[in-house]
Amino acid sequence: MKKNVLMNFLGKMADLISSKLKEQIKTYELELEKKKLETLVDNMDKAIVSIDVNGKIDKYNAKFREIFKLKEDVYNKNIFKILDFISEPSIDNFKRDKLCSFSYKKEGYTLKGIYNINKIVLKDDLKGYVIDFIDKKDAIKTYNKINKDYKITLENIIGESQEIKQVKKEALIASKSSSTVLITGESGTGKELFARAIHNHSKRSENPFVAVNCAAIPDNLLESELFGYEEGAFTGARKGGKLGMFELAHKGSIFLDEIGDMSLHLQSKLLRVLQEKELNKIGAKSNVFIDVRIIAATNKNLEDMIKKRTFREDLYYRLNVIPIKLPSLRERKSDIPLLIDYMVKEYSEKLNKSVSGVDNNVLDAMLSYKWPGNIRELQNLVEYSVNMSYSSIISLDVIPKKIRTIKHEEVIREDDSIRTLDELEKHEIIKALLKYKDYKKDKELAAKALGISRATLYRKLEKYNIVIK
Ligand SMILES: Nc1ncnc2c1ncn2[C@@H]1O[C@H](COP(=O)(O)OP(=O)(O)OP(=O)(O)O)[C@@H](O)[C@H]1O
């Protein structure tokens, strides 16, 4: 009996010791984890601060104290008192605002930059925010990164057709000048790509390229996004004011995409900037000189808009100094095989698949399709097909039906370009096959209609890789 009690006691002691030990190991591991994280955060280039929902600071890194020149610890202090460009009502804005510009002044020291707000949400509950800050020099780099600023050059814009070669030539000439360029073309034809290439070939290439989509930003915000404002410009204006995109693009280029969507009010402001090369920031006492190259783009017909009085004629002439019109994919179908080849490789790598190309039937179907969404649509289609493909060559059964089924109207071209005899023959064969495809003796009837024997028809089907599903 006594032995049992002793065994029981020893067992309990052992459990206690082991749970204590586990706890110690856990605490040790947690501390180690904390130390590692602190070192990591302290060595970052960005200044970071973490606050609770009321603005109370609970964590920050060394860079935060350094860039804001904070002499002592600011734990448990309120961020609104430390950084006056963030005001209490604006904490609400944190919920929708990402990436704001700021200007900070302290004892003769001024810092301008942008900050980014990240919400901390745990199990659907908002627990606070982590804010990171970058100064203006780095801000421009970040801005470019956000705008996917990989070095696009004219050489790496894919296309060998006469149509694309011609626009590449025009774009190269445009890049050597500082005049305004207006790029027109259907949606997805590569307007932004060309704008970036023009900038990258210009002598401004080391300076920022800032892209603004005029249709994506509501009109009342677009004005301050483009031109910025001074501190105290209006009720609700941020402390320290706001840097506009024209200022961020100083000595570089600004890309005004979807310019046709800009309101008439902003069109007049833009015209003034273009004419005077000066910016009158809202609330500013004097004008700011700006040296920015403007590249605008639209898929709208601005001349029609002028007639309807929805686009200012004087602005149109100011913008349209060097016009560049991008061809639709329909107008440069000979580039399709090249584009597919490039895109299949790109997505195969990205998606970790080993797809290397498309078979001839797929290529035929793609050549017959009209591509209303141009290169962007082709890109989406290739991404989809690479995803769906179960073999190294994409076959007809994995591509979407709308492209797979060759329709009569796609066979008959609308334009008056000259077709090769082979092309003509192929199209007539497809037409005949489609006409009789629901008949029992479809091939025989098609051959008869074409005035050739069945054997010749089969030979030609093989020659042109024609498969009618
Ligand atoms: N010649 C090309 N070679 C490879 N990719 C291209 C080419 N042209 C365009 N693209 C790709 O097609 C997509 C659409 O291009 P981009 O955004 O430049 O078109 P856009 O005309 O500006 O379109 P939108 O008017 O809809 O804004 C992008 O992903 C771009 O990388």
Image (spheres, rainbow, N blue to C red):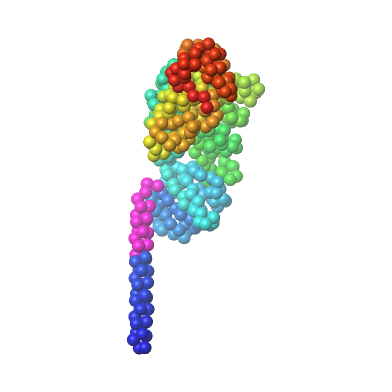
Q: Nearer the viewer, residue 167 or 22?
A: 22
Query: Does 346 sit above or below residue 452?
Result: below
Residue 234 % position (x, y): 59, 42
Which residue occupies the foreground of this view, 404 or 105?
404
Provide residue 315's location: percent of width, then percent of height: 57, 23
Would residue 53 be seen by someone viewing this image from the given angle? no
Q: Nearer the viewer, residue 295 or 386?
A: 386
Residue furthest to the bottom in view is 2
Residues shaded magenta: 28-46
Q: Answer with left or right where residue 333 lies relative to residue 407.
A: left
* Residue 72 position in % (x across, y down): 40, 57
Residue at screen point 37% across, 66% down = 27
Quadrant placement of the N terminus: bottom left
Figure check: 227 above or below 466: below
| Total marks in image | 0
Q: Quadrant of residue 138?
A: top left
Residue 186: image quadrant is: top right
